[in-house]
Structure formats: C-alpha cells, structure tokens
Amino acid sequence: MKKTEFIDPMIGTVGDEQETSMHGGGKTHPGACYPFGMVQLSPDTTTSGDNGTGYNYCQSTIEGFSFNHMSGIGWYGDLGNLQIMPVVGDTDLRSGTNQEVPFTKGKIGWRSYFSHEKEIAKAGYYSVMLDRYNIFCEATVSLHTGILRFTFPKSDKSGVIFNFSRRIAGHSDLQSIKINGNCIEGYIVCTPQGGGFGRGAGGIGYKLFFCIEASMPFKSTRFFENEKFLSCGINEIQGEDIHLLLDFDTEENEKILIRCGISYVDLEGAKRNLDTECPHFNFDDILKKCDDAWEKALGCVCVEGDDSTDLTIFHTCLYHALLDPRTMVDVDGRYVDPNGNIRSAAYTHRTMFSGWDVYRSEFPLLTLIDPVSVNDEANTLLNIALAKNSSFPRWELMGIDSHCMVGDPGLIVIADAYVKGICNFDTKKAYDIALASSLSMDELEKKPFISIRPKCEQYKNGAYVPRSLSDTLEYLMADYAMACFAKKLDKNEDYAHFLARTKTYANNFNKDTGFMGSRDENGNFIPVDDEYSSLGCVESNIFQQSWFVPYDVEGLSSLFGKERTITLLERLFEGADLSALWNENYNHSNEPCHNITHYFNILGLPRRTQYWTRRVQKEAYRLGAFGFCGNEDVGQLSAWYVLSALGFAQVCMCDKRYFINTPLFQNAKIRLNNKYHPCNISNEFEIKCDKSPNQFPYIKSIRLNGNLLDRYYLTYEEITSGGILEFELEK
C-alpha cells in the first residue's frame, strides 16, 4: 500500500470559534500541497476570527479556493491570496463570510453550502461539491503552481470569480491586473497596514505575482470593486478592491480548468514557473506527479505496523512535517532577499519559520530525515540576519521577523545544525551574529546591530528578564546553544562564559513556593497565588514553565529535590486530560511542555517515559478534524509524534542525545543522506521490535548493532551512522 494512501489532511482542520474550547484546534487545512511547496491550494470557509488557514471544519460554507496558506498557526494567520470561486447565476459581489472588509450591498454573498460527505482530501488533492451551484471542484498542485478543475451544470450564466484583494486576517492593499486573451496576469501588494499576521502587528508585507489561464474562452469579463461592476471593456486595472468575473456558457458536466503559477520575484518568474511545471491543462498528469513527489518525500521514513489508526496518524504527521519551511525560490533559482534585491544562491531560500515552536521537535526530526532543508533554513536565517544586521529571526514569514513569541530560536536551530555537521553555510558570519545577539551588542561590523535580546542591566549582568520567567528560561536555553556552538569552534572563553550563564537558572527558583518564578527589577520574586499562576509566563503557567531547563534536568531535580521532582512530574501528567485542547497541568497543546515525558529517562525511570509517552501518543492524537489536541504549529506537533513513534526524542537542542521510548511500530527505517550524515555502517537506520509494541509497551532490553545498550539514549552520530536498533519488549 502506498504511503500517500495513509495521509488524511482532514486531521486537525478545526479552527477557532467552535464550542469546545476558546483555544481552537489544530488549525490545519485540507488543501492540495506539494512537499515544501510554494503553493498550498486550499478551500476557504471563512475570512474571520483566529482561523489562520481560512478553513474551519466546523463551518458549513465555502467562499473560494486560494493559492497560498499557512498551516497550523494562530495569531489570525496570513496569505490566502488569489481566491477563486466558481458560480452559476447572479450573486452578491462579496463572499458573505469575509469579515475583514465591509459587506454592505448584498445579503448572502457568493459562498456556497457544502457537505463533508461530499469532500475528499488527500496528499496533493482536494475535491468538494458546491451544493448551491451543483459544481464539482477539484484541486492539485506542483511546487510553484496550482490547477483547479470545475465541473459545471448546463447554464448560460456560469462564471468564475477572482478575488484579488483577499488576504487572511486583512486584505491586500493594491492589485494590478491585466487580461491578455485567456491569460490573467498581475500582482498584488500586501502590507502590514492591510492586516495579515497578527492583524498587522507581525509587520508582514510581500508582493505576489501570478499568471492565470483558463482552459476555454470566456464569454465576457467584468471587473468589480466595492460590490459594484465597473465599465465594460476594461482589460487592465489597478485598485484596492479588485475582483473579476469571467462569464461562460457551459454544457452539462462541462469542465473548466484554471491553472496558475505564482512567484514572489516578478511576473516573468510566475510565467516561467507555470510554463515549466504546468504547461497544459492535464489535471490528472499534474496530480500524478504530485502524488509521486509525496511518495518519494515520505520515503525518508518507512514503518510497518498492524494498527491502521497509528499508520494514518503517523503518515499524516510526517506529511505535515514536510510542508514547511517552504521554498521561496522560482524554478530558475531566483528569490527576493530581505532588502528587495533579486538573487540566486546555491541553497534553496525558504520561508515559514515558527521558531519558538519548531526548534523543539520539527528541526530535530528534519536533521535526521531531511538535513538539506535544515541547511537551507540555516542559510535563510543567516542571510536575513545579515541583510538587517540583526539577530536571527524569531518567527519568520516572507523574509520578515514578526517577533512572535519569545526567545532566540534561530540561534538554537543554527547551532544545533552546526554541532551535528550540517554546516554548508558561512560559519564565521553565523557565529558573529549569534554572539552579537547573545551579548545584546549595539554594533557589529561597525554598523548598528539589532538584537532581540534585552538590553537591561538585569539581563546583561544577571541573565534574567525582569517580570518574565519565560523570557529568562528561553534565553538561557539559547545561551546553552551558544555555549555548544562556541565549544565546537574552540572558542573556549565564549564557551565558559555562556555555560556559566546557563547555570544561573537556579537563581529563578523561589524557595518560598518551591517553583521557578519571575523576579522584579531588584531581583525580588513577584508574589503569586500558586504554581498555576501565569504571571511572567508565555502561553504557560509556572508549574509548566518551571521544567524548562532541558540542558540540566538532573541539576533541576537537585534543586527541586529528587523525590519531590518525581512526585511533581507524576502530578503534572496525572492531573492532565491529555485529549483536551488546553490543560493547566501537562499541556501537549502547546510547546513549553513538549519532551517532558523523556525527563523520566534522564532521572533513571525509563519505564515512566515509556508509559507517559505512549499515553500522549494515544490520547493527544486522534483521527478526524479534532485529531490534534492544539494548534499544529507548522509541523511541531506532528514532528513530536513522528519522533516518538520511531522511539526517541531530542530533549535539548545541541545536546545530541536522543532519549529512547518504546517505538510505536514493530519495524521502521530512516533513510539517511550521506552528504550530511556519516553513514559509517549503512545508509539506513533500522528500528526493530521483537513483538507488537501496542501489546507489549515496555522495553526489556535494547541492542545497537548487536551490542547490548545499557543506557536509554542514542547519540545523533549513532543514528546517522546507520545500523540496527533492536528492542526486546515486555508487558
């Protein structure tokens, strides 16, 4: 059975505004995607609320299909450009579900009701029946293009609406459109003033070029703006709210196809992308190539098991982990750098780096299964930092640091890549940026330097951020990465300095409460009611955030007291509903708790790691739209599952140990890359269990390449050298 047949893109497609929780669901989308593809062609049910993908399974109407989306994110999202909607008959001139722009003249909009029973989502393919119009809609993609196939009923009032102003969490500020025969080409401009990520607070702006062609001549063209048709005969137009209606006469079951190439470089790039990847209207051919691309990409990991639910969740999670960071490079190798210059490079420039989320599991997974993407991302982050003479981006989109969340995750990812030998980037420049960021320097290379680290005296001298426990611990984690980076480069003084800083985490332990705590400007702990207070914590509470010292779990245990540490860890997990969308105890819905299940390993209780990891796998991940226990976060939630299903997790970036849990499958293989991995023994790393892990969930013994392993971790080098890891399991 092909791997793609196990993928269910419907998993996690619940968004905001649903009754069970204010925190929403996975916020993924079910549309057609290509591995790391520029185009994600997906249906839109709404342009409203914190529905960052534009699709929410809980809603019942579709307003169109747009060509670029973010997956699994909150903060209102972005992209969702080039929205296309087929219609029959006269309609209102707004979708009716776009709350980001006024809807004054119509009542219903052009949206259509649909049923999930008439909806299909697969890797690289999506289809749905629009009940209002009796139009069957299909979508598939290539790396830079998308193609829609609409099957119409018989009508002399068939049409296709193009919403060029549409943008999730806002609108585009300018659209420039030209009609040339059956070709529609132009560009849209999006700025923070028009909204987008954080409804503008993320500061995201970009220019998207497109070339669109229809498979059959249209009867007429009608531009409209502000819900009003413009004069006839217009073939070229600019404006702030431009839409276009193409009119057709259709016979019963007549198919109209729309193919589109996009580029963030220029119009020639969009045309070249379209001509190269989708030069015809052969929908089935493009679909097959997309399916083949997914089958090849998913071949980085092979698993065998007897539980169809496990296989579906695993492959769907692997699918999500391979969506981002996506390419920003056209087929000719060009991209636009952060200063607006068109460039080419030896690497693939990428975008969509949700750093605070993905440094924990997504990038540890990618270093094993796709180190090329990690090397690309290191180059991308470095070149953005060099262009701005700043720290590496914290949460990057379209070459811009939105500054969403906290910490210095770009530094962590680059340092982890380097210590693992993934280092085809300018190491000296990367280290200089990392050092300048870590020291909150004002100047680098005789130019003003913009650091994301605090400049207050408390941080510079005491390594803490007043009134923020989360900031303090995240920056200390980045300091640990900096120490590892320095050590690898024989920068011994820097290594000693940053290692010493990491040990100051103990200064944030409040003896009165027995937990970590935020301190004020004078170093005094700020009073809290109890450990469930969120004071000074980002998307977490003190109980959850107190565990975030992944580089020194044993030292943290000494601080808490060994017995009390175990008691608190058990309480953390036992007090949680692992299937819930939010918890005050262990909260798998959000990143601060990720990988804590493996703390038991470090503390000498591997069976508790095996127990709780399995519980999280089985309860926090499910089939269906409600399948993710929280926002999927650009691959992070999925990557945690994939790694743990293989039987390990990297608890701390730059610490190259992957701590072991019971695998989910009886047999698995990781395909290695000998350009980045040593492959001393084999080009594959095999994981074998003597019994079904579902029936025998505990580990009795482990052998690595035939030798008994007396520890519950593997090194990165052991995994990437290839070979066989064998488990003897028991109940």
Image (cartoon, grey):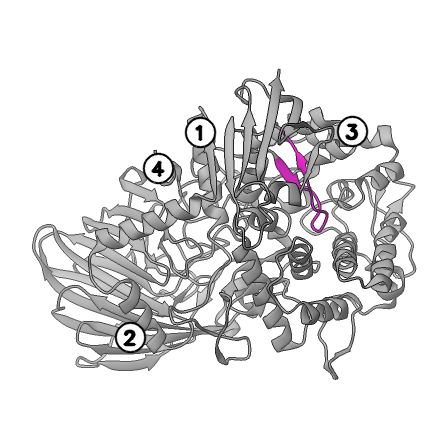
Q: Is residue 274 above or below residue 533?
A: below
Look at label 4 and name its amino acid. Answer: Lys
Q: Which residue is mark 3?
A: 604
Q: Amino acid at mark 2?
A: Glu
Circle 2 or circle 1, nearest the eye: 1
- Residue 235: percent from left, percent from top: 22, 80
* Type of amino acid at the residue the image marks with label 3: Gly
Element on which disc 4 rests: loop
632 displayed left or right of 471: left
The residue to which callout 4 is attached is 2
Give the spatial CA distance, label 1 vs label 3: 32 Å
Coordinates of residue 327 in the picture (x, y in percent) = 46, 63
Disc 2, SS: strand
Front residue of this view, candidates 357 and 426: 426
Residue 185 is labelled as: 2
Label 2 crowd (10 A; few <14 / some 14-19 / many >=20): many
Q: Specify whether 567 is left or right of 275.
A: right
Looking at the image, tell me whether mark 1 or mark 4 is earlier in sequence order.
Answer: 4
User: Dot 4, how many residues are within 10 Å of its Cα: few (below 14), some (14-19), or many (20+)?
Assistant: few
Write down the quadrant of residue 309 in the picture: top left
In the visual, does 676 lie left or right of 604? left
x and y, in percent, of residue 153 in the image: 12, 51
